[in-house]
Image (tube, helix red, strand yellow):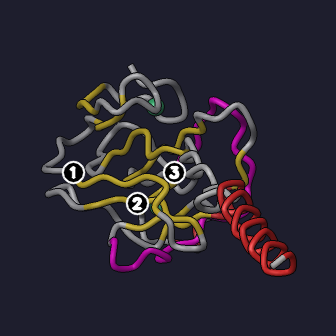
Amino acid sequence: MKSKNLSLFLTLLIISLMIISSCDKPTEPPKDNPPQKLKLFINEFMASNKTTIADEKGQYDDWVELYNGEDTTINLGYFYLTDDFTKKFKWKIPDSSLQPKRWILIWCDNDTLQGTMHANFKLSAAGEQLGIFSRDGKVIDSLKYGPQKTDTSYGRFPDGADFWKFMNPTPNSSNK
Ligand SMILES: [Ca+2]
Ligand SMILES: [Ca+2]
């Protein structure tokens, strides 16, 4: 009788410990916070440039302005620019540092031999798409745009904002 009581006691003790230990366990492993989106923006572009700004060869080509909205420098060499979302890695942006709250101009003239910041595609003034992708294929920024006006740019206002409008071009400077 005594040993029976002891075994009952031990059984109850084990069950109690199991319940307590299961209560201590977190119900699921802690999840990582979703990574914050990098503030690297397609900030302004011109798909029909006749007189606004010429490249190193004196050509009035299409251009895209990127903007670093972060407080730290971004190495652009981690990213790709494309006008076709089915080809995320269409053009690798060359290794270069973009300082915080600064801009950089990329010529979209499909003439990569003219310099480092010359992409291998042009922009369609009738409207198309533009995207920045990271090298692991994540979208950093993207937009689809409609028909464009000659020597009028289309950009975010203010820099890096969600709002887009046609504007007087400000290549390499703050959107107005
Ligand atoms: Ca050119
Ligand atoms: Ca600008």
Magenta-tinted stretch: 85-105
Q: x, y (%) of residue 36?
A: 57, 45
Q: Is residue 89 above or below residue 168?
A: below
- Within 10 Å of the Cα at label 1, are there few (<14), some (14-19), or many (20+) other Cα atoms? some
For label 2, the SS is strand
Q: Main secondary structure of the magenta part?
A: loop
Q: Check if mark 1's residue and mark 3's residue have beta carbons within 8 Å.
A: no
Q: Which residue is mark 1?
A: 145
Q: Is residue 22 left or right of residue 3?
A: left
Q: x, y (%) of residue 12?
A: 72, 67
Quadrant holding the N terminus: bottom right
Q: Foreground: 158 or 33?
A: 33
Q: Residue furthest front?
A: 1
What residue is at 60 percent from the left and 72 percent from the top? 135
Q: Quadrant of residue 16?
A: bottom right
Looking at the image, tell me whether mark 2 or mark 1 is earlier in sequence order: 2
Q: Which residue is mark 2?
A: 131
Q: x, y (%) of residue 112?
A: 55, 72
Looking at the image, tell me whether mark 1 or mark 3 is earlier in sequence order: 3
Q: Which residue is mark 3?
A: 55
Q: Magenta span has 88?
A: yes
Q: Is residue 22 left or right of residue 110?
A: right
What kind of residue is marked 2? Gly
Looking at the image, tell me whether mark 3 or mark 2 is earlier in sequence order: 3
What kind of residue is marked 1? Tyr
Q: Is residue 33 left or right of residue 111?
A: right
